[in-house]
Structures are given as structure tokens and as C-alpha cells.
Image (spheres, grey):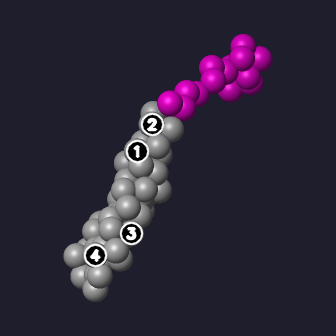
Amino acid sequence: MSSYMMYCRAQAAECARRAKLASTPELATERRNLGLRWLRLAEKAKTAAFGRTREPATPAVQAERR
């Protein structure tokens, strides 16, 4: 898990905690929605990390490594 993904999840957890402590229902809803946005960012970070591929080295680069 990437550090960015962990950061997003931590922010979502903090939003959920603050939603429970909110003084008004509107504020609780706003914080819950913010937490959901953080979770979506975490999911995007997860899919982006797995979508990366490493380009194969060209024959010239492979020859230099030997």
C-alpha cells in the first residue's frame, strides 16, 4: 500500500471521527461526504499504482548493464 493511499485512508477515518462529534446534522453530513471523497482518492491511488508498468529495457541498455 502506497503512503499516499494510507494518507487518504487516514484522512477518511479522521472525517468519520469528526462526523460523530459534529454539533449539527449538516456538519456531520458534510464531514461524512468529505470522508467518502478521501476514500475515492485512496481507491484511485490503488488502481493507479497497479496500473503502472515498467517499460522493458532496449537491447542497447541491456548491453551496457553487462
Secondary structure under the numbered disc 1 in the rendered image: helix
Specify the segment rendered in magenta.
Answer: 51-66
Residue 26: where, in percent of width, then height? Answer: 34, 74
Which is closer to the viewer, label 4 or label 3?
A: 4
Pointer 2 residue: 47
Secondary structure under the numbered disc 4 in the rendered image: helix
What residue do we see at 33% from left, 68% from top? 29
Secondary structure under the numbered disc 2 in the rendered image: helix
Secondary structure under the numbered disc 3 in the rendered image: helix
Q: Residues within 10 Å of mark 3 (few under 14, many from 20)?
A: some
In this view, which residue lies farthest toward the top?
59
Residue 36 in view: yes
Q: Amino acid at mark 2?
A: Thr
From the viewer's perspective, is 59 left or right of 27? right
Q: Is residue 26 above or below residue 7?
A: below
Pointer 1 residue: 43
Q: Amino acid at mark 3?
A: Glu
Q: Is residue 17 above or below residue 34?
A: below
Pointer 3 residue: 30
Q: Amino acid at mark 4?
A: Pro
CA gap between label 2 and label 3 equals: 26 Å
Instruction: Check contact, mark 2 vs mark 1: CB within 8 A.
Output: yes
Mark 2 or mark 4, earlier in chain: 4
Q: Residues within 10 Å of mark 4 (few under 14, many from 20)?
A: few
Q: Is residue 60 magenta?
A: yes
In this view, which residue lies farthest toward the left?
20
Q: Quadrant of the C terminus?
A: top right
Pointer 4 residue: 25
Residue 36: quadrant of the picture: bottom left
